[in-house]
Amino acid sequence: MKEIQMVDLQSQYKHIRRKIRKRVKNVIKHSAFINGDETRIFQQNLAHYLGIHHVIPCANGTEALQIALMALPLEEGDEVIIPAFTFISAAETASLLGLKPVFVDIDPQTFVMDPKRVEQAITCKTKVIIPTHLFGQCVDMGAIMEIAEKYKLYIVEDACQSLGADYILREGSGQLQMGPFTYDYRCTDKGIRKKAGTIGHIGCTSFFPSKNLGCYGDGGAIFTDDDDLAARMRQLANHGSTKRYNHRCIGLNSRLDSVQAAVLNVKLPYLDYYNRKRQEAAAFYDRAFISCMQLKVPVRCQYSTHIFHQYCLLCRSERERNALRFHLENMGVPTRVYYPKPLHLQEAFAYLGHKAGDFPVSEDICKRIIAIPMHTELSAKQLRYISSAILDFFD
Ligand SMILES: *Cc1c(COP(=O)(O)O)cnc(C)c1O
């Protein structure tokens, strides 16, 4: 059996090697490494896939969030609501821009931002909410958009882990009012859907190699249906300029280079297939662990598909989780903890004055969660091996 990895990018590459080589070679041949055709084509391809007007490619997911926040009419000290349980990027960029990250606790079932907590955290300084569609499943965006409309807030979606996931609005067709937006929908047999990251004012994603759509280096993108925001974000990503050597505002150098765009142009048509492979592996795990009393399998909410950027199990205690990790390591099964520490207890945010106990759900989940191997190349044999290694521990 092949060595088990958390993510197996090499095996994935083997299936698309010829296409990748041809396309990357072509970039080198033409030497348009920055702002070349591949990048322009990728914008169009991704916009089409997402069903959105504007896609602005940029250097990585963190800068996507930064550019999104820079594009909004915000002032120093304005508050940005962010889940306490996620990767640091959103809170980090808010902080860098002189905004105040305001953390909220998560839903213990789905691990994503709890809309009830969001409403409780709103003050007269709140301007933005950044819901993270964590592990590949959407936040309850219907509830978030209602809050956005009620309090006139901007929504910037962190879709770094959920590219291709569907938010399911409802069954039926026609026009739908959600928050400040009116949507026309074509109905599918599985209800009305929107892609994660296309529901709020701005969506952000990352093409970090291990993401569901990963390139071979750093990459990111921002999406919006708003023409003005799109123009502003395009300018911000390009040194605050629309015309060469003419800078209208302070921006940054944030680009997706042509080699990465070429890789993404090859991989984007596989994204749905890749996500399906992840869902199949998740279904296998579910069946294996559903009757194991010591473990809780990931909960699927009805308003979202789950594309399993991570497959995270919940143990009964921190001690049991750590012992399980040790046992699996000895069996050749790698595991990770996403995330071992909530944001409010990170040293970097000590200046906000939080203490243990402030966000009890996030703190509890950090102690008990464990991510097991999840990628597009898991064989039936590997899945069987991983599952029995886990069940053996509890026998
Ligand atoms: C990966 C990730 C980011 C950051 O993306 P980079 O491209 O690494 O900067 C931000 N938020 C979440 C939730 C992520 O998973």
Image (cartoon, rainbow, N blue to C red):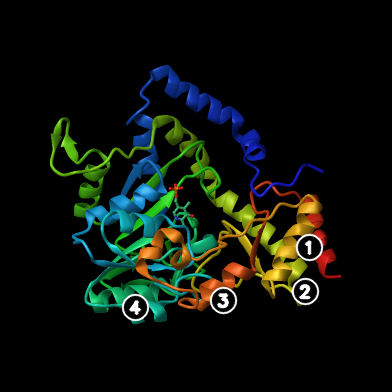
* Image x and y of residue 102, in percent: 35, 70
Taking the spot 24% from the left edge, 50% from the top edge, the residue there is 230
Q: Badge 2: few (under 14), some or many (20 or more) residues near its Cα, within 10 Å?
A: some
What's the amino acid at mark 4? Ala
The reply, left or right, for residue 65 in relation to residue 248 is right
Classify residue 313 by image quadrant.
Answer: bottom right
What's the amino acid at mark 2? Cys
Q: Secondary structure at mark 4?
A: loop
The residue that label 4 is drawn on is 121
Q: Secondary structure at mark 3?
A: loop
Q: Nearer the viewer, mark 1 or mark 4?
A: 4
Which of the marked residues, 2 or 3, is nearer the chain's N terminus? 3
Taking the spot 39% from the left edge, 39% from the top edge, the residue there is 42
Mark 3 and mark 2 in contact (Cβ < 8 Å)?
Answer: no
* Residue toward you, 235 or 123: 123
Query: Where, quadrant-wise, is the N terminus in this rendering?
Result: top right
Q: How far apart are the alpha carbons under marks 1 and 4?
A: 39 Å
What's the amino acid at mark 3? Gln
The reply, left or right, for residue 256 in relation to residue 3 is left
The residue that label 2 is drawn on is 292
Classify residue 104 by image quadrant.
Answer: bottom left
* Image x and y of residue 195, in percent: 43, 60
What's the amino acid at mark 1? Ile
Taking the spot 22% from the left edge, 77% from the top edge, the residue there is 124
Q: Secondary structure at mark 1?
A: helix
Which of the marked residues, 3 or 1, is nearer the chain's N terminus? 3
Q: How far apart are the alpha carbons under marks 2 and 3?
A: 17 Å
Mark 2 and mark 1 in contact (Cβ < 8 Å)?
Answer: yes
Q: How many marks?
A: 4
The residue that label 3 is drawn on is 109
Q: Secondary structure at mark 2?
A: loop
